[in-house]
Image (cartoon, rainbow, N blue to C red):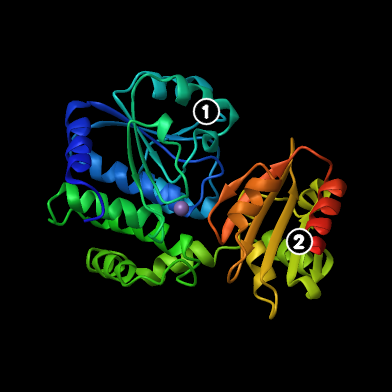
Amino acid sequence: MLFPNTDIIDFQNKINESQTITLISHFNPDGDTIGAVSALFHYLKLKNKTLKVLIPNEYPSFLEFVMKDVPHIIGSKQTDDAKLALSETDLIICLDFNSVKRVGDFLQEFLITSTKSKVLIDHHLEPEVENFNLIFSNIQVSSTCELLYEVLLLMENGNSFLNPNISESLYLGICTDTGSFSFSCNHRRTYEVVADLVDNGVDVEYVHQIVFNTYSENRLRLLGFCLSERLKVFPKHRAAFVYLSKNDLRRFNYQIGDCEGVVNFCLSMQGIEFGALVTERADRVRLSFRSKFDFDVNLFARKYWNGGGHKKASGGYSFDKLELVIEQLTTQIETF
Ligand SMILES: [Mn+2]
């Protein structure tokens, strides 16, 4: 069994004793955190709970198809509602993050100081045990959605709890967090879970079209620009990165999510094992890292870039100027 029975019973009791439950995703939401929030929303709706869904900032539009039936609060826009969702609730369930920092600067204070019971369901390394009352953490699974499936299945004593909404949401998290089944998916169990989801209403081709084939013209041209004008390759060091300035983003009328996946193109080159994307944002420079094989980008992001994540996918940030960040990253690559 993945988790002790006592934890499952504890979670069940927490849900039973709560009338209002708040679900919260991480900042800069991806398919896994949104899929998990949406799946759990549909599951708890069947239990007649009053649900509040808190998304710290806007999610990319390709995730709208699972959120359209999920009433939600965007924390960065509806700040008062967001605070209320964390204070006037009986239970808070955090999905797909390991640290309260991941809900963003504005919300983390309210999440920490909220006296309500907090449950974490997540697959990132080293969850902050001190900040949660109950934790379901496993780093072997493909995604939080796969983990959530296991937790709900245990809660239901192995009986099916899936309907098309829950299945589609869980599938969304698994297919995005594995890059369409190309990484973090070496376990047989992932495919057993997916088989069950397909049996219960997922149209794989439809989800794939919606999630992966919905580039705007600007997004596609931005990708072309990244690869032809902003790609630096270090063949000797088996590394490559793409950088984008605020001006570059403006030129292509950047929308949230438009840089999704750009970093993976670095790794699509033969002989390149470390890839990064450096983007200049309003208040900081953001970095995402990817690796093939053994280089641990979680450690790398923790050590140098105020961040972390997984061994093969991580992120961080810096308050230095873009030029300086590029210089620092170049030096790091050349010294490794
Ligand atoms: Mn995830």
Q: Which residue is drawn at 77% across and 71% down?
A: 237
Q: Name the residue under label 1.
A: 108
In the rendered image, residue 149, in percent from the top left (x then y), is placed at 28, 54
Kind of residue at badge 1: Gln
Q: What element carries label 2?
A: strand
Say above or below: 144 vs 88: below
Q: Name the residue type under label 2.
A: Val
Residue 217 visible, this orientation: no
Q: Which mark, residue 242?
A: 2
Q: What element carries label 1?
A: helix
Nearer to us in this view, 53 or 190: 190
Labelled disc at residue 229: none
Q: Residues within 10 Å of mark 1 (few under 14, many from 20)?
A: some
Q: How many labels does the image show?
A: 2
Q: Position of residue 121 (x, y in %)?
A: 36, 44
Residue 64 showing in the rendered view: yes
Looking at the picture, how far across and down is residue 20, in whole percent? Answer: 27, 26
Outermost residue on the bottom side: it is 270
Q: In which quarter of the image is the C terminus?
A: bottom right
- Dot 2, how many residues are within 10 Å of its Cα: few (below 14), some (14-19), or many (20+)? many
Whole-number angstrom distance, CA of label 1 to CA of label 2: 30 Å
Of residues 281 and 315, the one drawn nearer to the viewer in this rendering: 315
Camera-nearest residue between 278 and 100: 100
Mark positioned earlier in the residue sequence (1 or 2): 1
What's the residue at 31%, 41% (across, down)? 41
Q: In which quarter of the image is the N terminus?
A: bottom left
Vertical placement of 223 versus 63: above or below? Answer: below
Q: In which quarter of the image is residue 25?
A: top left
Residue 129 location (% of width, % of height): 41, 35
